[in-house]
Amino acid sequence: MKSRKIVLSAMLIAIAVVLSYIQPFQLPFGGGITLASMMPVVLIAFIFGTKWGLFSAFVYSILQIVTGFKTVAAFFMPGDSQMNILSAILVCIIDYILAYTVLGFGGIFKGKIKNNTAAVTAGAVTSLLLRYLMHIISGAIFFGTWAEWFFTQEGFYAIGAKIMESFSASSLSVIYSVFYNGLYMIPEIIITGIITPIIYKMLEKSNSIVDLV
């Protein structure tokens, strides 16, 4: 049973990493819409429980740092993206380790909602909302200085002008982070919320996870 858990988790994490490379839409300063890349990690958490889910999600977060090393390294290297060491470390912790580890909460509704399909859907949406929250916090603290520039760009100017008139400089960074990260996280939440129960039902029908759930 333990070896089966490790093998299945490793397979699902590997699938998650591969899916994370498929990004039909990417933003210029990080973030993109993937083909439900977080769905496999949510399934691990639902199948094996929150404790194992958090551990697996943490492993996935480290792999995200490794596979996204070029972006991460830019925070420490001289140039426009360079930060002081403490800020760069905190960005890595919040934007990567915490943001992906919270996917381990994908199984928190297991046993609380009788219908497993509904439970895994609720877990997927909740865990991705937590990831969105981590990016909002990081963006507001460390990237909020880009807010004014962002809202004056072509395509955003109409709504950007109203936003800048309505909010103070201190709160503008939060609005910017909510807006910017929402451009990819909201579609990601919707996609994952739709695909996760479909994949779960397919696995359930094939009896491949019946003994594990």
Image (tube, rainbow, N blue to C red):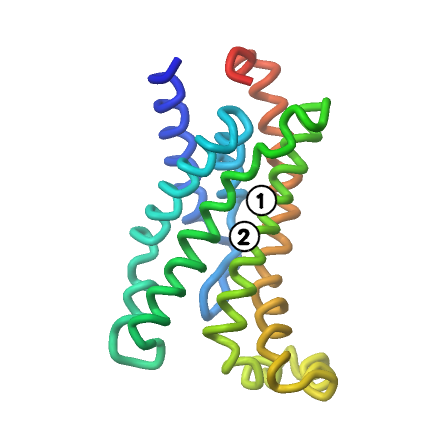
Three-letter residue code for mark 2 = Arg
Spatial CA distance of label 1 from label 2 is: 6 Å
Q: What residue does disc 1 label?
A: 127
Which residue is painted at 52% across and 24% down in the image? 47
**Which image quarter: residue 199?**
top right
Three-letter residue code for mark 1 = Ser
In-image side of 165 versus 191 (left or right) = right
In-image side of 161 versus 136 (left or right) = right
Frontmost residue, 124 versus 199: 124
Which image quarter holds the N terminus?
Answer: top left
**Which image quarter: residue 207?**
top right
Q: Position of residue 137 (x, y in %)?
A: 53, 65
Q: What residue does disc 2 label?
A: 131
Above or below for 154 versus 206? below
Q: Residue 35 carries which label?
A: none
Given contact means CB atoms under 8 Å apart, are the residues at marks 1 and 2 in contact? Answer: yes
Q: What SS does tag 1 mark?
A: helix
Frontmost residue, 29 versus 89: 89
Q: Where is residue 101 in the image (x, y as percent from the top left)?
A: 45, 45
Q: What SS does tag 2 mark?
A: helix
Which residue is painted at 65% across and 78% down in the image? 156
Q: Where is residue 83 in the image (x, y as percent from the top left)?
A: 34, 76
